[in-house]
Amino acid sequence: MKNKYIFGGIIITIFLAIMVYLFTQSNIQYESNFQNVMSKDKVCKATGSWVKSKNYEFDKVNRTFSFFMKDETGNEMKVVYYGSIPNNFESAKSVVVTGEYKDGYFHARDILTKCPSKYQDEKVKSSGL
Amino acid sequence: MIGSIILTFALACSIFSALMYYLNFRGYKNTLNYGRIGYHSMVLLVLTAAFYLEYLILTHNYGYKYVYDYSSNNLAKGILAATFWAGQEGSFMLWLVLSSIVGLVLQNYSSKRGDLEPRVMAVFSLATTFLLIMVSPLFKNPFAFIWSEPIFLSLKDINPSLLSLPFLQNFQFTDAQSGQSFIKMNSELFATLSSGGISLKEFIINGKGLNPQLLNFWMQIHPPILFTGFSMATVPFSFAMAALMKNDYREWVKQSFPWVLAGAGILGLGIMMGGYWAYEMLGWGGYWAWDPVENSSLIPWLVGVASIHTLLVQRKSQAKGGIGKFAKTNIILCLLTYVLVLYSTFLTRSGVLGDASVHSFVDPGMLVYLFLIIFIGSFLVLGFGMVIYRWKHLSEKIASEEQVLSRDLALFTAAIVLSASALIVLVGTSAPIFGKAVDAFFYSELHVPLAIIIGLLNGLSLLLKWNMTRGKDLLKSSIIPISIALLVTLMIIILGGVKDVMMIILSFSCAFTLAVNIDIAFRIIRGSLNMIGAYIAHIGIALFLLGVIGSAGYSKQIDVNLEKNVPVSALGYEMVFTGYNPIENTNKYQFNISLKKDDKSFSVAPIMYISDFNNGLMREPAIMSMFTHDIYVSPLGYEEDDGSSNKGNAVSFQKGDSKVYEGVKITFDDFNFPPETRQAMMQGKDFEIGVNLTAESHGKKIPLKVAWVNKSGQKTLTSADLKEDNVKITLLNLDASGKVDLALSKLDGSNLSAVKKPKEVLTVTASIKPFINFVWTGVLIMVFGFVISVIRRLKESFK
């Protein structure tokens, strides 16, 4: 046997195994129907739009930012994000929140705002590592 | 129109050049010059088109859609020039321009090295051909007129003196929701305008402008460097193809080596520059978020760096004659680097990532999507088709086998580890195509062990000799670096408070490779400086990893409310918000914060402003850089007393609000409104709704209660007295939604004084990032190492 195949093989196998494991662990589904979001107790990425008529609120004491989102069919849900208002939130066309729905609202740990198409090379970070 | 024509001619030249070069390779001697003429004409035409586009941008020619979409009159010259690459069309154009210039150098380089030119240039001009098709009028053409597809223009962008034109009525639309009016620009309106003798330049006087987050220095420098890296990835592909075409796998290694090194160095610099941009401008406090756009340029870089390691082994082992070790690996890795650049373009430009990234993507349409697939597919099939075709020749038997303790095997393992990293990032980034996504921990957890192996392997490989080392020798030579590394790790544990086992091992691994590399670098300085490149690059990587451990693993973060001129202690510093002031010549405001620790004091000034572009609040962090750490202050918001509605004695409180009256801070805590009371209220019985307040003065907190009392249908609103402070609080009204109105007056009935809110509060996120400087200096040192290596390998490429 050639040493290079043993070495290469072992490393690739180990990392492939860990990768597959972590992939199943950290696998997050996209969900554009809020009824599904509300019914399951698993972390997902909910995509929808911000309901502008219901204003957003920033709670300075608890440092939460809350607003309402609706999906394509009009289902609405309250979203609470533990952090500050993302830059550009006001002009966001669509919003992607990552988190879990429980206790009557969506607990978001990450918000992604999408702006109208003209901001092609938009660099907006709402949260990081 | 002119621009598109020039680009179309350039496309013809590029195809002609590729064909002539190929024919020359197939034995037609007289076509070599045609190939060269074709290529040079193509470069000339591409540059002309690029200058023309830049001219249109600088002269504000909004008749072109691209100019209208990304620039406006108020941009500073440097930024205005950089709007060239603000959109997809322009960035493809930038890629094309840089590719053609890289090709110019490559043509010169290859013409001096035997019969290399026709093969390399045939493949390279094939790549420029695809880029030219991309910017052709069929796909992402930057020279499209604004009327080529109907577009709604805001009235403020139209020349006001022309708005009264009667026929404009037919093109005017009003958005019912926002009440804004637009002019629908289409070919019909264009025809009407032209027949009236009005040019588009007269008609449209301003553009949409650029996103405020792109309005900075990095916008001018990051994209050109990144795309230079992308362009240079085409070169190893061309060399590998050239080798396959000739069926000679010996020469190409040394010939392509300086290119592979230079490409990896530039791409690495470009990637990290993007990270620094994010860190400095975007305010979320980090430099890498495993975002698809970042990832997709990292993948080809990792594969390119992997190929450097195995190319080195092949080159060394050629000394014994033959094609050397890892011939197949090298061909495959070099082909992959470019294919992955194309895949990265596909991911970020085709719209498949839609919701996955913080970068917004436009769906470019089905045609572009298909073309991108054809683009990748062609190069994939071409490259790997050739590999399969030549497989037997590539598998030339080599007598010697790699020993376990040899530098050859260590370098090969390094390439494997880097490829594993690339594969992980590739899988994670591609997941959204299948409607899935991975968390950031997917990447970070996998990369900790990978980084550990990389550090140990790197240190070890330098202690190992080529071919074979005896275990005893290895032990002897590794005692000193291991001791130093243990010492450094111990210091990191004790001084840095690092407790996580993986982080300790990683620290050790980085310290080990650092010690080995510095040791060798010092020994080399006395000898030939030429050889020092690799060691410097690895010192850079080790520093970079140490910086990552510190800044990602051990940063401390806190949100603080800073009332003006009131010191707050946070993260070991005393912070005082001293006020804000507008920054000259901008609409931005800087918020001055002074920081004090021991007797050192300094100030930072984060920035906030409302952007005209999107009517959004934009925030820019302030960074105080020190040797051991950065203090990173990112603004969240600012509130101030408007002074208008709070005068007099009737004051509204929301639940949780605090207001100051006569030196007393009064807080509305909550209602006392139990269900029994609610029931009593419904049934018309007697009830009492309490309002709980807290008064705070002279450091004391006094709970207070006022109430709405209903007795036998009679409503009474009670009051509470604060004798010590001479204040009387009377309930005026309450609203179950969480609002009360209180009358505040002096007990002795003297004049009512103004009521003040706690005023001028700046809220910031402050964090300390330990050793983040190591991240930046590490990358710079690494790039410097690449530069030295390129110079050395360039000299060798002639031999």
Image: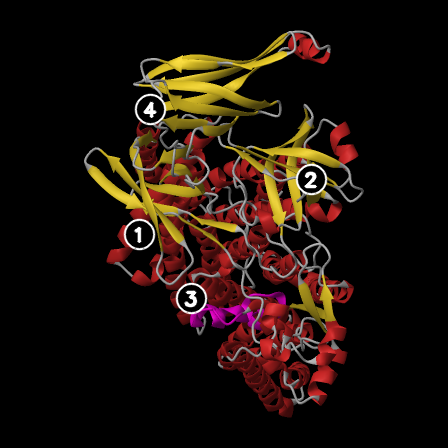
Q: Distance between the residues labelled 1 and 4?
A: 82 Å
The span shown in magenta is B72-94
Tell me the amino acid under the disc marked 3: Arg
- Nearest to viewer (mark 2 / mark 4): 4
Residue B455: x, y in percent?
44, 42
Near-viewer residue (B326 or B724):
B724
Question: From this viewpoint, is residue B149 visible?
Answer: no
Q: Name the subunit of mark 1.
A: B
**At numbered mark 3, what does the secondary structure look like: helix, strand or loop?**
helix
Of discs 1 and 4, which sits in the foreground? 4
Residue marked by disc 3? B793
Q: How far apart are marks 2 and 4 (CA)?
A: 51 Å
Q: Compared with residue B464, is residue B13 higher up or lower down, i.e. above or below?
A: below
Say few, some or many: other residues with alpha carbon within 10 Å of mark 1 (under 14 / 14 to 19 / 20 or more). Answer: many
Say which of marks 4 and 3 sits in front.
4
Q: Earlier in the sequence, mark 1 or mark 4?
A: 1
Front in this rendered view, residue B787 or B214: B214
Would you name the residue on which mark 2 appears? Answer: A69
Image marks 2 and 4: residues in contact by CB distance under 8 Å: no
Residue nearest the observer in this picture, A64 or B247: A64
